[in-house]
Amino acid sequence: MLSEVDFSKRLKKLPPYLFVEIDKKKKAAIKKGVDIISLGVGDPDLPTPKHIVDAMKSAVEKPKNHQYPFGAGIMEFRTAVSNWYKQRFDVDLNPQDEIHSLIGSKEGIGHIHLAFVNPGDVVLIPEPGYPVYNCGTIFSEGSSYFLPLIEKNDFLPSLEKIPEKVARKSKILFINYPNNPTSATATPEFYERVVAFAKKYNIIVCADTAYSEIYFDNKKPPSFLETKGAKDVGIEFHSVSKTYNMTGWRLGWACGNPKILSGLAKVKDNYDSGVFNAVQEAGIAALESSQSCVSEMRRIYQERRDVFVSRLNSLGWVVKKPSATFYIWAKVPGGYTSAETVEKLLDKAGIVSTPGNGMGPSGEGYVRFALTVPVPRLKQAIERISKIKW
């Protein structure tokens, strides 16, 4: 037995992973017998469409899929991604060297740092934001420079406020639209500014676009790669997780600049053995089949959005109706911090939510709700909130 186990300095620098901590609190409350309404973690409650499950069942039975997959992914999957991007965004991608499969986009986002960031290099990270942008920076011994996302700027980072000396030391810029947690969307004009900024300072842009298909009122969010010159400076991360309710399947991709992808590929070749081919075949079924299931998903989330936002506002909360994602970014009641609001929602109403400041200091004053329960449970949540004395 070891007398002492000393974690690495990198591991010690990591903040507690927010959603693991939220899950712990949820499980502790359930253990006490609390009827929990979980609006914390963004994990869809809707099932994976049957035709995708059936494709997976068939693919699992093929002996050729039982071996190491290795590499960028089967060509059929990469071709399906290429065709989907062309149809959805009118973006041309060469399946040969401009698309690489991932074990979920989270994996690729976490690994990309190791290909390009040296100790001390700066990584530009939006906050509040997805924790993995910062975790990957810590593991690569880079230096995180946070870009506040605030309402008066439409939750877009102010690139012009980045100090010259910081910009010149930066290797990667992360952007994420539609945005988690604020639900904001980006404009083509913003993406044009990103491309110009990246070219000026020779910075790699990593666009996280996992929520592009969860949009409402027919307001389709653009892809970063639609922007002229985007492929010269960056790549985009995408996933089947949210679009097809496949979070547990772990399938995504990175696409765009082939040289940047080759760096990520070298890291992955040394860390994993690729995505299970049967899962890729299921991904092909998702991308190439009728997208009516995606339209139905959007209808369901839009109904939930409309019910929850209108009723929360009727209680005196200040909430803007989002045009994308299944998140509600709500201002907390006056006099309360984000953490105090989340604690009170859990203790007094059995509602699990996410404190805004848990995803970055600029999130203070907000709480994030995930619309991942049916309408009756959302109505029940509102009823419980209405009985809390703030």
Image (cartoon, rainbow, N blue to C red):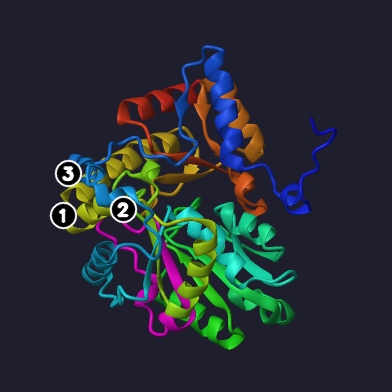
Q: Earlier in the sequence, mark 2 or mark 1?
A: 2
Q: Tell me the SS state at disc 2.
A: helix
Q: Residue at x 22, y 69 (%)?
A: 83
| Cα–Cα span, label 3 and label 1 | 8 Å
Q: Which residue is mark 2?
A: 277
Observer-nearest residue: 310 or 301? 301
Q: Residue at x 59, y 28 (%)?
A: 24
In magenta segment, residue 228: yes
Q: Tell me the SS state at disc 3.
A: helix
In the image, taking residue 160 as reference, residue 380 lies left or right, namely left
Q: Are marks 3 and 1 in contact (CB under 8 Å)?
A: yes
Q: Tell me the SS state at disc 1.
A: loop
Q: Amino acid at mark 2?
A: Asn
Across and down, in percent, residue 285 comes to: 20, 53
Q: Amino acid at mark 3?
A: His
In the image, taking residue 312 as reference, residue 205 lies left or right, namely right
Q: Residues within 10 Å of mark 2 (few under 14, many from 20)?
A: many
In the image, taking residue 88 as reference, residue 192 lies left or right, namely right
Q: Which residue is mark 1?
A: 289
Span shown in magenta: 209-237
